[in-house]
Image: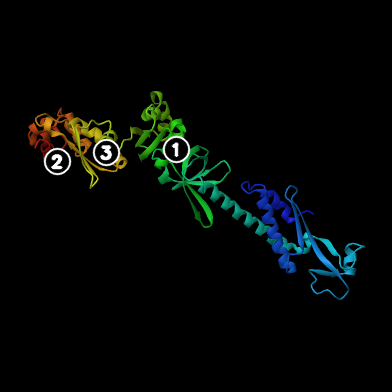
Amino acid sequence: MGLLGLADSFSEFKEFKSIDRATMMRVLEDVFRSMLKKKYGSDDNFDIIINTELGDLEIYRRRLIVDEGEVEDPNLELTLSDAKKIEEDFEIGEEAIEEVKLEDFGRRAILAARQTLLSRIMELEKDEIYKKYKDRVGEIVTGEVYQIWKRELMILDDDGNELIMPKTDMIPRDFFKKGDSIRAIVLRVEMQNNSPRIILSRTSPVFLERLFELEVPEILDGLITIKNVVREPGERAKVAVESYDDRIDPVGACVGMKGSRIHGIVRELRNENIDVINFTTNQTLYIQRALSPAKISSIILHEDTRRAEVYLPSDQVSLAIGKGGYNIKLASRLVNYEIDVYRDNVKDDDSDIDLDEFSDEIDVWILDELKTTGLDTARAVLDVPNDELVRRTELEEETIIEIKKILASEFE
C-alpha cells in the first residue's frame, strides 16, 4: 500500500546521502512500531515489511482465533466469526494474519509519524556529519564559498554540508567572493545547539604542514620529517625539516628545482615568506640556522632560563630582526629560546654605523628625514650641532636630543 503523507517523505529521505539504507529501514520501523504501541498497546504481534525502493510499507497483524466470548485481549485474539470476515477457511486455534491499513491510524497520527520520522533522520544526519568531520580534524578540505558575513564565511563541501571559517582563521590578505573555491584544514568540530559546527582554518601551522605533504612526496613517504612549523600568517613562516637518509637533502627536496615545490605553497598562503631550515639537535647551530639570512658572530646560551644572547656584526642586526620583527619572533618560537640580539661592537668600535641599523629603535620616517639631508650614518648625525639639524630637518629639538642619545649609546 502507498504511504499517503509518508510516501512524500521517502523522496525527501533520498536527499540524506550520508545515511545508509539499513539505518533508514530501522528508523522507519521504529517510528511505525511506536505508532502501533500507541494504538494497540503492544507491537509484539505485528510484522512490518518496508520497501525503500518503492516507498512502500506493509503492516501485518497476527491474532489467535478463539471461540465466541473467549476473547481476553482483542489485540492478540479474535473470534472465529471475525476471522472468517478476513478469510473464509480459518478455524479455531489457527493464527489469523490481516493487513493493517495506514488509514486506520487516522490522519493526525500519520502526520505526527511523518514529523517524528523527519526529525529522527535529521538527527542521524547530524551525527553522521559530526563523526565524519571529527575523524578529519587536521586534514585539508576543499569547499565553495557560499555566504560571507562580517565575522565568518560559510563554505559548502562536496556533499553540501555547511562548514565555517572565522575571519580570525583567514590569512590577512585573503579575499574570497561567493562561489570561490577554498582550501583549509579542519581545525575542530564542536556541537552547538545540537548541531555540528565544523571550524576551518588557513592560519594554523598544520595547514602549512599539510600543504608541504601534498607538494613533497618524500614527506608523505616518511623520508623527510617536519619537526616544527611556526607561522605569522601571510607574512613569514619557518619550517624545520629532517631526513634520516643521508642521500636526501631535506631542504632542497622541500624547496624543489628553482623553488618549484615551495612556489605553490607560497601562492596558496598569499606570498607568505617560507624559510625551510635543516633541523639539528645542536642548539647553537639550530639558532644560527633559524635566524638566517643573518650572519652570526657568536651565541651564548642560558639553558636554565631558555635565553640566547646572539652577537652579530652591525650590518646584520636588522636582517636578524627582520621586517616587523617577524624573523626574530619566529626564530624564538621555532627553537623555543628567547633570543636577544646584540651588536658585535669589538670590531666596530671605531667604525661608523648605518642609520638603517637603528630602525628597531627609531621611527623609519625620522631616519628618512635625516637621510634627505645627506646624513646616513650615526657619526655623521652626531657631528652636526642640534640647531643646525633643527634648521635642516622638520624635527623638533627634543626629538633630535633623544635620537643623538640613542646613536651615541652605540659607541660607548
Q: Say if mark 3 contacts mark 1, CB within 8 Å.
A: no
Q: How far apart are marks 3 and 1 (CA)?
A: 26 Å
Residue 399 numbered mark, or none: 2
Amino acid type of disc 1? Arg
Which is more toward the observer, 88 or 381? Answer: 88
Which is more toward the observer, 121 or 206? Answer: 206
Where is residue 110 drawn, in percent x and y? 72, 60
| Element type where label 3 sits in the image | helix
Amino acid type of disc 2? Thr
**Hey, which quadrant is residue 355 in on the image?**
top left
Where is residue 71 drawn, in percent x and y? 83, 73
Q: From the image, state whether disc 3 or disc 1 is nearer to you.
A: 3
Q: Residue at x 24, y 45 (%)?
A: 306
First in sequence: mark 3 or mark 2? 3
Which is more toward the observer, 290 or 363? Answer: 290
Residue 123 numbered mark, or none: none
Rendered-image quadrant of the C terminus: top left
Which residue is the site of mark 1? 210
Q: How far apart are marks 3 and 2 (CA)?
A: 41 Å
| Element type where label 2 sits in the image | helix
Left-right relation of 229 to 49: left
Q: Is residue 108 visible?
A: no
Residue 283 numbered mark, or none: 3
